[in-house]
Image: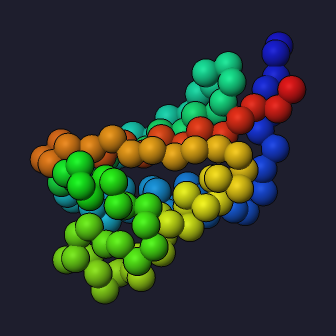
């Protein structure tokens, strides 16, 4: 078997996954489906968290990783707007990347890519 490894701070990556899954739950209708997948593309380990929530417009997607930005102010009391900013910082410190694809009314998918070692 060809074992592929990602060298990372497990606690920090758990924090990333917890935040992304928590957001997917928070912004999805009750009893909706959230999909979580992980796979290798040969160069990176890819984690994708997809919800069937409200989705976001392009302007919101462009700002969602900025400090203190909250695209949906109806949930403003549930956080401080630092979550996705910290997620991006942690991913970047691991030499990875994070992106979001979303459309209003169609949900969102957050994709985290962490480089494979050796």
Q: Residue at x 64, y 53 (%)?
A: 92
Q: Is residue 38 above or below residue 41?
A: below
The answer, for residue 66, to whether it is visible in the render is yes
Farthest-out residue, top: 1
Q: Is residue 23 above or below residue 62?
A: below
Residue 3 placement: quadrant = top right
**Where's the N terminus, which quadrant?**
top right
Q: Nearer the viewer, residue 13 or 114?
A: 114
User: Residue 25: horizontal and vertical position, in percent?
Assistant: 34, 59
Q: Is residue 95 left or right of residue 82?
A: right
Q: Is residue 20 left or right of residue 104?
A: right
Q: Is residue 74 left or right of residue 80?
A: left
**Where's the C terminus, which quadrant?**
top right
Farthest-out residue, left: 105
The answer, for residue 33, to whether it is visible in the render is no
Farthest-out residue, bottom: 77
User: Residue 110: horizontal and vertical position, in percent?
Assistant: 42, 45
Q: Is residue 73 above or below residue 97?
A: below
Q: Residue at x 36, y 61 (%)?
A: 64
Farthest-out residue, right: 118
User: Residue 17: horizontal and vertical position, in percent?
Assistant: 55, 55
Q: Nearer the viewer, residue 25 or 111?
A: 111
Q: Residue at x 32, y 65 (%)?
A: 26
User: Residue 80: horizontal and vertical position, in percent?
Assistant: 42, 82
């Amino acid at each position: 078997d060809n074992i592929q490894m990602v060298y990372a701070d497990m606690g920090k990556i758990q924090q990333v996954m917890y935040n992304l899954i928590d957001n997917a739950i928070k912004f999805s209708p009750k009893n909706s489906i959230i999909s979580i997948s992980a796979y290798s593309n040969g160069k990176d380990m890819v984690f994708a968290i997809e919800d069937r929530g409200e989705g976001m417009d392009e302007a919101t997607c462009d700002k969602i990783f900025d400090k203190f930005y909250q695209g949906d102010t109806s949930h403003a009391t549930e956080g401080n707007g630092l979550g996705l900013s910290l997620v991006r910082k942690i991913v970047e410190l691991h030499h990875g990347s994070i992106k979001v694809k979303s459309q209003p009314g169609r949900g969102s998918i957050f994709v985290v890519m962490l480089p494979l070692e050796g």
